[in-house]
Image (cartoon, rainbow, N blue to C red):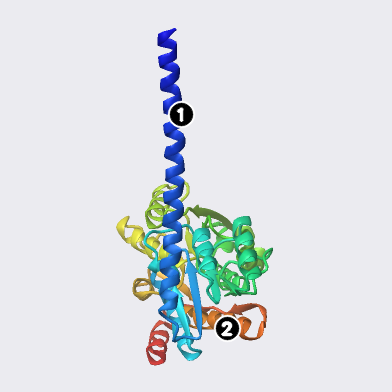
Amino acid sequence: MSNQRTVKRKIEYTVSFLFFFFIILAVISMIYFYGQVSAVDDDYHRTQEFDFHYVMIGNSPRDSHWQEIFQGGLEEGHEINAYVENWGVYLQQDFPLGKQLEMAIAANVDGIIISGYNSEEMEELINRGVEQGIPIVTLFTDVPGSDRNAFISINDYGLGRILGQQLLEISEERMLVENGETLKVTVLTQTTWDVGVSGVIYRGIHETIGEHGAHMEINSLEIGEQGEFEAEERIRDLFLNLQTRPDVLICLNATNTTIAYQSLINYNLVGQIVILGTSDNDTIFEGIYRGIIRSTVFINERNMGAEAIRLLHSNVIAGYSSDYVIFHVELIDQNNLYRFIVREELDE
């Protein structure tokens, strides 16, 4: 009996210890979370010389393309005396997008621009912010079931049409119809994408290629949320497997376009796979110049950031909502690369 009491007492001590341990852990987590919010809130109070405090929240706040969007928003903010903050850059760790939005709402900022994904969590958080009187504009991917004030994005259907026209040109150059051959096309997509977005792009492609689609085998390859490392692995596996290797690879962001270009060189596959890219950077321009990347679709990210702030500000000042704004895209290839670079340098 003595041994049984001893064992029972040990079990009770263990359960009590674990109970208090988890309580202490929960308290520490709450203190840390609100410390983050307070730190951001302190930054706000240090910016009282501005009339408004707006934040921009994106999946990769340090990414060069998000920085370009933010720069456009920052410059527009100066025009309207608003402090525009690239939210995730100032946090001490990489919080999930939903947590960042929750923290921005808790900090009671004047307006929020968020580029994320469509989910029930995002919908609930956006509704909470709008209920508190904080206008919220979604960027790139919409959350249509929410009370968001406006949505701004590129013309996804127009993007699909441009890509479809490129496929038609490649098909004609290779005389696929005459030779009875099939063009194998792979589209790299992201797991965070709204299904509706990819559907609109695909519709633009298929409606453009029309009857020529019978000579094209179009499929998709999904890239997860683990960043460049996963993208490199998936593209490598795609290229090195003779059964899956495409004739044309369509990349829908700058990261995948750049990795695909570098992979073609690394695996000595230049000339065997055509890359159709998206966005712009020096590496992509180099690939176009060398003829390794056939073309890329340019999105004026700085103008988009400025327009997002203007749209947000109009909601703050007048409660005006234009529902959504569509940005048009532009194709860059060897024929207009030089003119494009000169034009962009003159605009800076």
**Image quarter for residue 271?**
bottom left
Q: Which residue is drawn at 47% across and 49% down?
A: 244
**Count of numbered badges drawn on the protein:** 2
The N terminus lies in which quarter of the figure?
Answer: top left
Q: Residues within 10 Å of mark 1 (few under 14, many from 20)?
A: few
Question: Callout 2 environment at 10 Å: few (<14), some (14 to 19), or many (20+)?
Answer: many
- For the residue pair 218 and 92, the one nearer the viewer reads as 92
Amino acid type, residue under disc 2 in the picture: His
The front one of 26 and 261 is 26
Q: Earlier in the sequence, mark 2 or mark 1?
A: 1
Residue 130 percent coordinates (x, y): 64, 70
Q: Which of 133 and 61 is in front in this view?
A: 133
Q: Specify the quadrant of the image occupied by residue 220.
A: bottom right
Quadrant in which the C terminus appears: bottom left
Secondary structure beneath label 1: helix
2 vs 1, front mark: 1
Q: Tell me what residue is drawn at x 37 percent, y 75 percent.
A: 285
Horizontal side of 184 relative to 227 (left or right) equals right
Q: Which amino acid does label 1 sit on?
A: Val
In the picture, the disc for residue 335 is: none
- Identify the secondary structure beneath mark 2: helix
Question: Would you name the residue on which mark 1 appears?
Answer: 15
Mark-to-mark CA distance, 2 and 1: 54 Å
Residue found at x 39% / y 92%? 346
Q: Is residue 78 above or below residue 321?
A: below
Q: Determine the residue positioned at 36% across, 76% down.
A: 289
The residue at which mark 2 appears reads as 313
Q: Where is residue 342 in the image (x, y as percent from the top left)?
A: 38, 89
Q: In this view, does 192 lie to the left or right of 32?
A: right
Furthest toward the top, the residue is 1
CB within 8 Å, label 2 to label 1: no
Instruction: Residue 287: give x, y in percent of width and height.
Output: 36, 71
